Amino acid sequence: MSESAFDSEFVDEAVASFGATPHFGDPSGEQWALEGGRALVRRPDLAVISVSGADRLTWVTSLASQNVTDLVPGASRELLILSPEGRVEHWAGASDDGETLHLIVERSDVSEFVAFLESMRFALRVAVSERDVAVFSSIRAGANMPESAADLPGHLWTWEDPWPGVVEGGAAYFQGECHPGARTPMMFHAVSREAADEFEAAWLSACPEAGSRRRAGYLAWEATRIAAWKPRLGRETDARAIPPELDWLRSAVHTTKGCYRGQETIARVLNLGRPPRRLTYLQLDGSRGDLPAPGTPIEVGGRQVGVITSSARHADEGPIALALIARAVPVTTVFDIDGVAAAQEEIVPVHGKSSVSPETRPGADLSREAGQRGGSTGFGGLGSALGSR
């Protein structure tokens, strides 16, 4: 592996190219403040798509993994657009004001997302456009509540990420008692572009009794996101990623809402309990002081079994990462990533069953020989599992 696979503090060039600030001189302090509800992150790496028209909610519901037909003003939903094969193509945080559906999306994906929506309009009463607004992120904690931002200058709406809750129609792969994401519920504030600086200044000066507020860079946000096991489009997703591999059914998919693109794949994986790959959380040995870059391969016995998707230096946990690996790799496996030990914490279980998967796999009484026709590879079919990374 080349030395360039590791960096002392990984900086996402794509995110930085949109003008995001990595940090303001104190990444650890910024992260602690962020987790306590006392820091605000400006997010030029995010954009907003607006969908107006009488058919907007039923139309988006017919396309997306989530049901937004009954979305009322002030409520929040997370949705994915899947390919016909069930692969993740687009992500959005959805809010509606009674006249327009607003989708917070990755800026790197906004053009393709708009083009997809335009291609699916047909004769329906909908209009699609990119909206020029600023987006900020914060953590709901302490005095930082959604309503506390509502009266600040330029505030338009706040989208509350449902992660890691299991929403109506959702399904959980991690079924432990305490999901780490529950400690850091995420909020995204849409603000008028012209009033963005004024909003930021007002937010920072609010609630002096709750302690000093500060700005935080995206390194603090990414460390918090990774520690919360939250998937991100373009990081945890590749050309083959499906939601069950990422435990994304809990917040972004309504498994019983009816027909949508990719539904057959979701149903099949839920019933069979065998997503090809699984997201895992890695605790990295911090003695070297560097981080594996996204895309760094993970090998066992000289054979690639997965890839690093995100990495960060956490203020409390040290160097951490998310990785997408072949499902059958044992949880007890400690990886050696260019001389750095990486121990796993299970997110999607090796057995591959979710909270709504049947106890007995349909067809289990049939001949195993018929089910295994074509042979297998060392970790449950790595060739197809790793995809095109």
Image (spheres, rainbow, N blue to C red):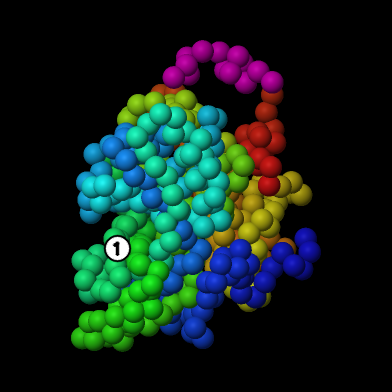
The quarter of the displayed image where residue 200 is located: bottom left
Residue 173 appears in the rendering: no
Q: Is residue 171 left or right of residue 70?
A: right
Q: Find residue 250 and report its horizontal and vertical position in percent.
A: 37, 44
Furthest residue in direction right, as rendered: 2
Q: Find residue 349 and report its horizontal and vertical position in percent.
A: 47, 43
**Which element is circle 1 on?**
strand
Q: Which residues are magenta?
A: 362-374
Q: Is residue 302 left or right of residue 173?
A: right
Quadrant in which the N terminus appears: bottom right
Which residue is at 33% across, 47% downward? Answer: 101
Q: Main secondary structure of the magenta part?
A: loop
Q: Which residue is mark 1?
A: 156
Q: Residues within 10 Å of mark 1 (few under 14, many from 20)?
A: some
Q: Is residue 335 left or right of residue 205?
A: right
Q: Find residue 119 and report its horizontal and vertical position in percent.
A: 51, 35
Q: Amino acid at mark 1?
A: Leu
